[in-house]
Amino acid sequence: MYKREREATKFDNCNSTSKKKLRINILNSGSPRQLIDEHLSNIIKYIEEHGVGRYTDDIIQDALIKLAQKAELEDILDQRAYLFVTVTFKVKEYQRRINKEKGLFSSIEDNKLFCENKALEDPHLLKEIAETNHKKQTELFHHMEEHLPPHQKRILYLKFFENKSYKEISKIMNKSEGSVRKEASRGREKLRNLML
Amino acid sequence: MQTKIQELKSKSSKNHLEIVSLMIQYMNNELPENCAKEVENLINGCKECESLYREVKSFFNPDDKFIFELFNEEKIENARKKLHIVSEELTKDEVNEKIEEWDTYSCCGA
């Protein structure tokens, strides 16, 4: 059982003062933070893709508090699902706020946002986006295979496809965390230059 | 499973969460074969579910994530730093205030 779930179970027996206390404990214990941290790049990518990139910090902060709030209310069976639902809801909320505050077509930017959202529903465009992404991925794997030394390849694989932390990778590879970070950074730099 | 999924098709946010959870498990091959088949049928059998699954996939796709991280390292690091600062600095009153604000602002949150 996740720590946060255990906390939530305990919550049923709390009176209102300790509820407040627990709420803060959950926030400080780092559990919601860890969840966001683990998926941070997915979250930022999603926010940017949906045209609300300038509100990234606000959305992340709102999601953090929302997760901390939710943790006290009920068991969360799948934290990933809850994170997804929270972030997508927050993004839509900010999109609605933009549209409401300025009027749907009051500025070119909003018009663009509206078109982008509409475009995401277009199956032909979606297919095109998927093809472009697939092409980029193929190119990336080719470069990884051809141009990276095996240890860098392994570090990047463990980090990005197995979702391991640098600490875990350092244990797996029997290297210091610092050297793992350095190698990952070198590998990424190499790939970045090759992909440009 | 079939009955369960039929139940989940209702629109309450809790069920929405369960559908998303099933989709993530399906995407990561974490479901038993028969359940995976049911989820597959659900995705292919309803446009809304198909589009939701596309969104879930795009959100968690490790390949896209890697490419994004490759070109946005600094941005992500800055956001991570801010996240850590915010989670350390938020006070009890600020959190409660924010929660009250939501309670009055939003009628149907996640």
Image: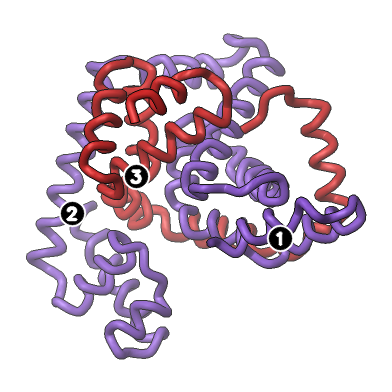
Which chain is rendered red in the image? Answer: B
**Which of these two is toward me, A137 or A174?**
A174
Asked if disc 3 and disc 2 are in contact, CB closer than 8 Å, the reply is no
Indicate whether A173 appears above or below A42. below
Q: What residue type is labelled 2?
A: Leu
In this rendering, the label closer to the viewer, 1 or 2 = 1
**Which of these two is toward me, A12 or A141?**
A12
- Element type at mark 2: helix
In this rendering, the label closer to the viewer, 1 or 3 = 3
In the picture provided, is A32 more to the left or to the right than A161? right
- Element type at mark 1: helix
Residue name at image x 62 percent, y 20 percent = A96
Chain under numbered label 3 = B
Residue name at image x 71 percent, y 60 percent = A26
Asked if disc 1 and disc 3 are in contact, CB closer than 8 Å, the reply is no
Tags 1 and 2 both on a single chain = yes
Expressed as whole percent of the image width and height from the top left, the position of residue B50 reads: 32, 23
Give the image quarter of residue A56.
top right
Q: Mark 3 points at which residue?
A: B25
Residue name at image x 29 percent, y 45 percent = B31
Question: Drawn colour of chain A?
Answer: purple
Chain under numbered label 2 = A
Chain under numbered label 1 = A
Tags 3 and 2 both on a single chain = no
Query: Residue A140 got which mark?
Result: 2
In this rendering, the label closer to the viewer, 3 or 2 = 3
**Residue placed farthest to the left in the image?**
A146
Of the image marks 1 and 2, the number of the one nearer the N terminus: 1
Q: Which amino acid does label 3 sit on?
A: Gln
Q: What residue type is labelled 1?
A: Ile
Q: Mark 1 points at which residue?
A: A26
